[in-house]
Amino acid sequence: MQKTAKEKETAEKSGLSPWEGDMVVSQTPSYFGFVYDHSLSGKSKEEMTMDEYKQWFMNEMSVMPVSGWYRSTCVGGALTITEECFERMKSDPEWEKTVLGMVRKMYSGTGIMGSRMIGYQVIGATPEQCHGEGIPVKDGSPLSADNEKSWWEKRHERMEELIGEIESKAVKRVQENRAAVQENYLKNQMASRQRLQAFPAKSIQNGDDAVVFQSEGRITRTLNAYEENINIFSESVFEREKI
């Protein structure tokens, strides 16, 4: 709005038309400083220049009632009517009627009191060139964005809670599996050593020393291979749990 005011001020000083370009009206609407030339009322649209037509159009907007709901809800922003829109309205009464209806409907809007917003509305030469957006304004009211969490905020918080629960369960499962693997490994290792120690003594009692040493070597190699397999198995379990 400040930029538009400066541009109009510059245009007036330079002798150019202050109505040139898009028309920008603050929201909620303020027509401070606007003075309508009533002599334009006797002219047809074909006789009006583009500047005169824009003055006529702004006068039509200035007499539209603005609802209390809209004034309390929309606390800033701008309504922009493009130059292309004015060119079409001036020669197309149906589009002029449509645009006036859009503005009238916007100003007369009603609803449940809620969070305030800054509203931006652009009206172009076609329906596809018309668009708007409302940006919520945070304040201390009971229904403001500060106190009323949006659906997306609640969903994000719930997802964080679920992720935390899943992570806790995964860590607990890894710890339990690691303890079980370690316990099983220790039991197998102890049993293997007990068998290894018992086998030479039994063989010596039977008088078969050569068999004792040969068997002992084979058992030692078998035990080492077993322990290595257990280690590999344990590591694979740990890696799988990490994934």
Image (spheres, helix red, strand yellow):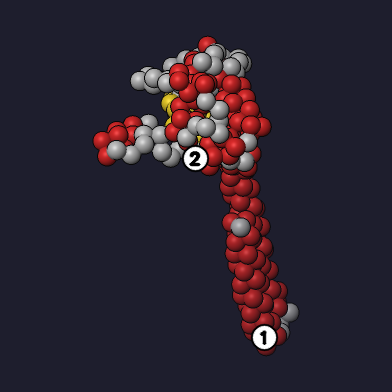
Q: Which percent across, then down, holds residue 43?
A: 52, 25
Q: What mark, if any, has residue 214 been given in the picture?
A: 1
Callout 2 environment at 10 Å: few (<14), some (14 to 19), or many (20+)?
some
Task: Please name the residue shown 63% across and 64% down the image.
Answer: 236
Q: Which percent across, then down, holds residue 69?
A: 54, 14
Q: On the picture, is 31 further left or further right than 144?
A: left
Taking depth in this image into account, of 193 and 21 the one nearest to the observer is 21
What amino acid is found at the position of numbered circle 2 in the picture?
Glu
Residue hosting label 2? 83
Task: Please name the residue shown 60% across and 67% down the image.
Answer: 231
Residue 55: which quarter of the image? top left
Can residue 192 be seen here? yes
Task: Please name the residue shown 67% across and 62% down the image.
Answer: 188
Instruction: Indicate which disc, 2 or 1, sits on the residue closer to the N terminus.
Output: 2
Q: CA distance from mark 2 to mark 1?
A: 103 Å
Q: Which percent across, then down, holds residue 125?
A: 58, 40
Circle 2 sits in a helix, a strand or a loop, which is it? helix
Q: Residue 34, relative to residue 188: is it above or below? A: above
Q: Residue 28, relative to residue 187: is it above or below? A: above
Circle 1 sits in a helix, a strand or a loop, which is it? helix
User: Which of the two marks, 2 or 1, is nearer to us in this view?
Assistant: 2
